[in-house]
Amino acid sequence: MEEKETKKFNIKLLITVIISLVVITTILAFLQRLVEPKYMDNSGEGSLIEEYYDNIEDHQIIIVGDCEVYENLVPPVLWEDYGYTSYIRGSAQQLIWQSYYLLEETYKYENPDVVIFNVLSMQYNEPQKEAYNRMTLDGMKWSSSKVGAIKASMMEDEQMIDYVFPILRYHSRITELKKDDITYFFDKPTVADNGYYMQVGIVPADYVPEGKPLGDYTFGDNAYYYLDAIREICEEHGSKLILVKAPSLYPKWHDEWDAQMVDYAAKYNLDYINFLEHTDEIGLDYNVDTYDAGLHLNVYGAEKLTRYLGEYLKENTDLEDLRSNEAVAEEYNQKLLEYRERLAKKEEERDAGK
Amino acid sequence: MEDLIEILEGIHPDVDYNTCESLIDDGILDSFDIVTLISEINQEFDVVISAEHIVPENFNSAKALYELIERLEEE
Amino acid sequence: MLFTSYSFLFFLILLFVIYYVFPSKAQWVILLIASLIFYALNSPVYLIFIGITILTTYGAGILLDNSFVKEKAYIKEHKETLSKEEKKAYKRANKTKRRWLFWSCLIFNFGILAVTKYTNFGISNINGIMKMFHSGTELQFVDLIIPLGISFYTFQSMGYLIDVSRDSVKAQRNIGKLALFVLFFPQLVQGPISRYGDLSTSLYEAHPFDINKFMRGIERIIWGFFKKLVIADRILPAVNTLKDSYETMDGFYVVLLGLFYALELYADFTGGIDITIGIAEALGIKVKENFIRPYFSKCIKEYWRRWHISLGAYFTEYLFYPVSVCKPMLDISKVARKILGEKIGKKVPVYLSTIIVWLITGIWHGAAWNFVVWGLGNCFFIMLSEELDPVYIWVKKKFKINESKYYYRAFQIIRTFILMCSLRMFDLYRNVPVTFKMLGTTVYKWNIASVLREGIWNLGLTGVDYVILIIGTIILFSVSMMSRRENMRDIIAKKGYVLRGVVYGVLFVCIILFGAYGIGYDASQFIYNQF
């Protein structure tokens, strides 16, 4: 009799434990969503990676890299003038292994004809900054690629579990919540146009600091390892890999670095375009085409660069002009429209701010 | 036995040592009292109570303590 | 591996699963392996030190025990033939042998402790003396590793040795079991210092899974983490700022430091012990309590019976008593009585032993002079209150103060609290003259208004931090108040499962949300891990 009672006792406790665990998990999931950075008005770049999942389709071109792609190339313009569909999987200070894993993940969804990689991140051989890691990796859906990317990216004081349960990383934000955290709790508008993050400001590049001379200009082994990996995965899927270097005046793209990329491209028979050598042909005017004095292009500069790239692709690849494909055209003309609207709105805001 | 009670009363006058059986457990005697007590007993009975004898069982009542003294006198 | 690291939590979960999946008889072996892994993960080199301590203690324990067994058997066998004198002589001869063995093992092990922890302290003192004599030579500091938890495990294993040498416990003949007693991981790095007789009963037993007991352990662990992560680690930056900028932060800042450190130390240390006892409880093992609401003590003597109980008991049992009742001390007492008279002479052994105990307690806390002064400070106030006892009685009589009235008790509690806070300043500033100076400024420098208006915003805490700390302190205080008659956890457990679920669920969520852990906070060790 007594034994039976203790057993009943235990079951009751067990049920309490299970119910408590479910309730606590729900509450924590809710709180986690609350404290996660929403990346809207402030550092909207953090939203770029996750926006891809709403835009999965067979793009002809996939572009990977850091701010030198997502602020410098405009997919809607590439459509408007050349009929190419493209998507930029870019993120702030995207490191080369992150580019690789993003590309690897993208191949699980689609098979692009052309892959463009911006080579600035070759300069980094190790993880750089936790905050940038999070902006790139948090947006990824869980997959072996995400795990690989996290493992390759973690700084010494970072832990995998902080990525599995972001609340462990962001809990301290509970004391500094902003309106955005409530507004965009469930849903948030897209911040980018197929991965292009628009900037409309105009700040002339009247002063460009001299780059610091380096002791050793050789790119690191780790960087080369992942460049090889990117090249190989493209080969495997029959995509043409094009290496580019955006026409940013700063950080300085050293001649020694450039030479290594030229060699690498020659060795593996790849295309490599250093846009810095073509600024006149592109028509860039650094007095009006950058929003931060030469680091990145604004939308006007980006459109020019995009058209130059489009021309290059037309001459050097056999990508099909899809403007005559009705289904695609309908979708992309809509995207183009949204892009134009965003541009008009941002210009208006800019002018009102002046 | 009377001598012992007298010593004990010298430390805490207001305890009935004939009946109390929880001098340690109730915290009536603290470590200072115990040491004073042992030194007094040494004076009075000429026995050495060493540290290993300081356990609650030996100090909880006057009776137990007296038994300990007798046992030590034997040896 | 810190208690507050993810890897430790992972280790713990894994252990719980393995511990209860395997047959109960193997549980102590699993614990031993887990403890070895825990220790080795911190640094495999340390295992050599703890291994030596285990081996010597094990060997000496068995030899001592054998000697007792042999002695008893011999006397029993020759009961008829031996005269009283012969019996005595035989016993004495054995005792001498045992004494040699016991002392060599004891000195050897405390020697390791002394060398690893106090060599540099010794060197700095020798250098100081040589400087006084204008000697140009200076000894180099040595770079010694201090094995993890060495103070705790040395004390614990030597406690066992003493108990065996007194024949009050039987020696452990299974070396694995003795190793587990010394290595038992939850208490290895910060105590409590368990006595063999207390811990061994439940340590080696089989513990079938009991969800009720297990959940109580988990609850206690959660409570410990709440204290450590939400309160102790959150206030830590303010404590560090206050003590590091002692040149500018004086007067009321010192008072603030005293209060903040009292909170931090309590939350940190008792939180750590809660985690330790909770882990043991979840494993079915009973570890003795180490704190009984110490800040409610009415005098320093009582405070030390309620704060870090296992250490105080250890020193009383194994140091204070042996020293104060040893033959030379009794002789001193006799001489003192003759010279100084009955009344004062009586107190000589007590006070002399107290001074020795506190000197060593001070040094145990840290190899530095500030800890010596801290220890002697405690000692001074304990003796002072003994001496002032007649004065108190007189005052109480004169002003008709009722001792049991709440206001008088409150006065005693606050007085003790202030005294303890002041003494801890030696621990904080780590410099004796500075500490005296800072304590002085609390009296003559009245900057309370400006500190409360502006100063508190320069300590590295934001408004939200203060709110969390205040609420946390209120929770701590209320729990202590409510636990006076019955343990808070028993009260909650009686109220039914729903309340239990809610309380511990809320605590858990609070830890996750408000805990000062992860990137952006400096991971901090438990304060007592350093000893």
Image (spheres, grey):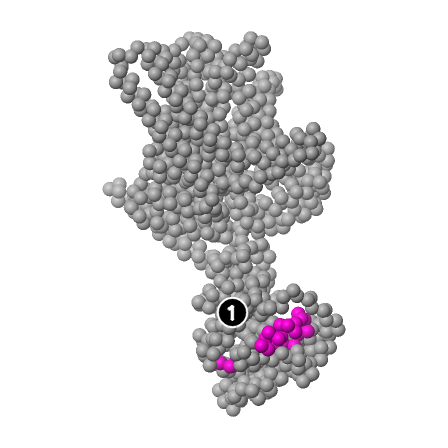
Q: Report the magenta residues as a range.
A: A239-263
- Place of residue A310 in the rendered image (x, y in percent of width and height, measured from the top left): 59, 85
Residue type, mark 1 in image: Tyr
- Horizontal side of A28 relative to A66 (left or right) equals left
Q: For mark 1, does the 10 Å Cα neighbourhood hold few (<14), some (14 to 19), or many (20 or more) residues?
A: some
Residue B6 or C85: which is nearer the viewer? C85
Residue placed at 69% from the left, 31% from the top? C135
Q: Position of residue A352 (x, y in %)?
A: 71, 73
Q: Is residue A235 above or below residue A138?
A: below
Q: Is residue C445 left or right of residue C333?
A: right
Residue A247 part of the magenta segment:
yes
Q: Residue at x 65, y 41 (%)?
A: C243
Residue A30 makes an appearance in the image: no
Q: Does residue A79 appear in the picture of this structure?
A: yes
- The N terminus of chain A sits in image quarter: top left
Q: How far from the left and from the top, in percent, is residue A309? A: 60, 83
Displayed quadrant of residue B74: top left
Q: List the residue tagged with mark 1.
A: A225
Q: Nearer the viewer, residue A270 or A30?
A: A270
Name the chain letter of the residue that bears numbered label 1: A
Dividing the picture into quadrants, the one containing residue C67 is: top left
User: In this image, A27 relative to C352: left or right?
Assistant: left
The quadrant of the picture occupied by the C terminus of chain A is bottom right
- Tell me if residue A53 comes above or below residue A310 in the rendering: above
Residue furthest to the right: A206
**For this rendering, which residue is in front, A328 or A228?**
A228
